[in-house]
Amino acid sequence: MLEALDLDPVQQQVYEALVDGAVTVSELRSGLALSAARVRAALAALEQLNLVGRFAAEQGRGEERYLPVAPEVAFESLLLAREEEIHRTRRHIQLLAARFRANAAGRDPLDLVEIVTGRAAVIRQVDQLQRSARKEIRGIDRPPYANSDPDRLDPKTGMMPVQQQMLRRGIGYRTIYDTAGLATVRRLDTEIEAAAELGEDARVMADTPTKMLIADDRIALIPLRAAPHELVSSVVVHPSGLLEVLCAFFEVLWARALPISDYLAGRPPGASDGPSPDEARLLALLTTGMTDQVMARQLGISYRTFQRRLHGLMERLGAATRFQLGMRAASLGWVLQPPGNGRAYGAVNGDVDGGVNGHAEPRTNGQSGGGRTAVNVRR
């Protein structure tokens, strides 16, 4: 734990042994199973850092004694020095970034983009881009995924650790999740809900055209080509006309995507008698256009339980079809809409089931089956 202060493992062991009560070289040797030379070298380094004090043997008898300086006192000055060093480094990086931007206009066009190849390199670039953000990360999340291995995800939330760290630092995230990813890999009830609780603003869209990651307005990452099951190469885009187009393109898609994060964070709009958390999640899923089976899996319930909850919500709102359910939920303010879109989101049930593209598909016996729910009433 003290490596950040440039203490090597032996120095850390020696200091902790002193804290635990050892005072002489002999005691340290027997307790740590180290040679006298290594113990003395570690003590000399700790003494130079003002972490320990050395005291001569009493009346020339016995061994020298070493006592640790109180940790809260000993390490405070080291921490302050390290923080100042980090601040100086950050200021220098900002100066370098300003020089880079000032000279960008005269660069060779080939310097404005770079190709990253190989899964490991793409993963490193994704992490580096997120850590470079100062205000906001914008992203389009869709298959294929380069960093979906279990060891790359938080075991409790399913989130990527880098995203957690950046959200906790106050970096904003706006993410458009493609329904293809929700149907196969992403989980609303774990990773996306956990991100929403930390402040991510999430929306959902079907058939997004590409993956994308943008840090502030400074750098973007898009796929160069994608293998059938793995992202193997990407293009890093630096400040340029291409980057401006990518930023504007994201905003166009964002305006068309369906809000979902407020539902997942337990903040559905509406009156005091609004939807319960389970009903809010169900409504959020109904706007995505996923099949009933996929929505049931996202909720962690059986298909039969999903149907029972759906029909219970329809009965509560007095809706005979999913289309009526969407309209009535929208009129109550239970369904979020993108800014500037006055249309209600709904899905059709009963004799007609609205498809993702708004095409009506006949159903029999009032069953919704495994068909898709309509994302909204299309223009």
Image (spheres, rainbow, N blue to C red):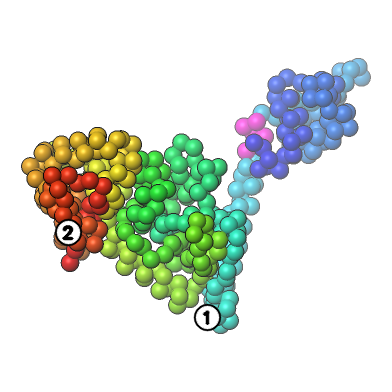
The main secondary structure of the magenta stretch is: helix
Quadrant location of the N terminus? top right
Q: Is residue 57 above or below residue 148?
A: above
Q: Nearer the viewer, residue 63 or 202?
A: 202
Residue at 31% in and 68% down: 252
x and y percentages locating residue 375 in the rendered image: 23, 56
Q: Is residue 362 above or below residue 7?
A: below
Q: Is residue 282 above or below residue 253?
A: above
Mark nearer the N terminus (1 vs 2): 1
* Residue in the picture at 40% in, 59% down: 140
Foreground: disc 1 or disc 2: 2
Neighbour class for label 1 at 10 Å: few (<14), some, many (≥20)? Answer: few
Whether residue 261 is visible: yes
Q: Secondary structure at mark 2?
A: strand
Left or right, 271 with reference to 211: left
Q: Are marks 1 and 2 in contact (CB under 8 Å)?
A: no
Nearer the observer, 57 or 213: 213
Q: What's drawn in magenta, residue-wise?
A: 71-76
Give the percent coordinates (x, y) of residue 267: 26, 43
* Residue 72 among magenta residues: yes
Mark 1 lies on a secondary structure that is loop
Image quarter where the C terminus lies is bottom left
Disc 2 residue type? Ala
Crowd class of label 2 (few under 14; some 14 to 19; many from 20; radius 10 Å):
some
Residue on which disc 2 sits: 360
Q: Position of residue 38 (x, y in %)?
A: 85, 33
Is residue 184 rendered magenta in the image?
Answer: no
Location of mark 1 (residue): 105
Residue at left offset 41%, top offset 70%: 246
Q: Nearer the viewer, residue 204 or 337?
A: 204
Q: Position of residue 349 (x, y in %)?
A: 15, 49
Residue type, numbered disc 1: Ala
